[in-house]
Image (cartoon, helix red, strand yellow):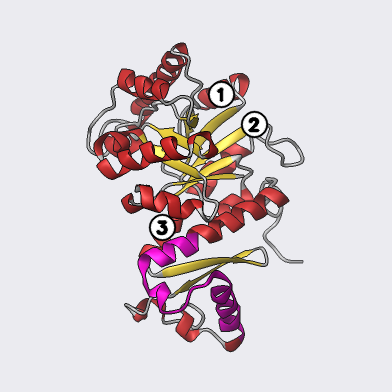
Amino acid sequence: MRIYYSGGFPYYTPQEIDALDQFGIKRRLYSYHFIKTDKSIHDGFNHTVSTYGTNHQIMVDSGAFTISKKGATINIDEYAEFLLKNKEYITVAVNLDIIADRSKPLEEEMKRAAAQGWENLKYLESKGLPVIHVYHSGEDEKWLKMLMDNYEYFGVSKTGDVKGVSTRLERIFSKLVDDKGRCKWKIHGFAVTSPSMMKRYPFYSVDSASWIKYGCYGMVIMFYNGKFMVIGMSDRKLTLWRKKGQHYNNLNQEERKIWDTEMEKRGVTRDTLQDNRTRDIWNIRSFKEFEEWITAHGTTFKLYRKPLFDCII
């Protein structure tokens, strides 16, 4: 599995890109919209391609989902021009997908968005751009079938319908795997990087901002013996972690020893982990360890099966 890391604006600066590179973080997700509108992201993207060239792997999406909430749109010709200009450095480019307007009748909007998104795919391909398309759960499954029939690599988004995330992904992956639970296509999961999802569904690649969200809430994560461990490390708002084992301060002796050993290994302390940026670096390194583990072990998907009878004999 490949994780493309996205995050807060400071981590797009040249200095932070160089810092993360020291820990082997060489995959990044950039939004075309923010490259165009935010100076720090613009400078960070240019620094990445000029300093690291093809040694870094870059995924670029349009940013359509983000700006759709503001009622804005992206010019497809300008997006195509940007992708063509940087084609040498972009590992994966994402189609300009269309997000359904939920203020209008949803069924008709889903039909319109899916059809227009497919037109955009064909238009960008006509420009010589090998973009990946996104199937949004809730769209007519004919669009998923068209991707399965014509493409090896495409994306799946959990947004689109009103049912639970697990229900959506279960339905989609049941159509993508063979009888041994192995996925026959390369699937990119958009914003589906909870550890449980990455362990259950056989994604080829995903993108994640989770590493920075944990740090914002004062938490640090560790991948240990095949499991994710999460605790509060910040000493601010301690009431958030009242239960035993939720915060470093209320770990038992054995649990604390595990974290102390890892802190010593990484060259940080309880005091330095009070700093938000230090927590972020810790967390992205933990995600990288998980990425390496899941790549080595692989993932297969098996449908959950309900018992035939609810009674106990």
Pointer 1 residue: 147
**Circle 3 residue:** 212
Q: For numbered disc 1, what is the local secondary structure?
A: helix
Mark 2 residue type: Trp
Closer to the camera in the image, 85 or 152: 85
Q: Is residue 102 visible?
A: no
Distance between the alpha carbons at the discs numbered 3 and 1: 32 Å
Q: Please report whichever mark, 2 or 3, sits nearer to the chain's N-terminal start.
A: 2
Bin the neighbour count of mark 2 within 10 Å (Cα to Cα): few under 14, some 14-19, many 20 and up.
Answer: some
Secondary structure beneath label 3: helix
Q: Amino acid at mark 3?
A: Ile
Which of the two labelled residues, at mark 3 and mark 1, occupies the earlier sequence position?
Answer: 1
Q: Farthest residue toward the front?
A: 51
Closer to us: 36 or 142: 36
Residue picked out by circle 2? 185
| Lower sequence index among marks 2 and 1 | 1
Residue 38 in the image: above or below residue 89:
below
- The reply, left or right, for residue 34 in relation to residue 188 is left
How packed is label 1: few (under 14 Cα within 10 Å), some, or many (20 or more)?
Answer: many
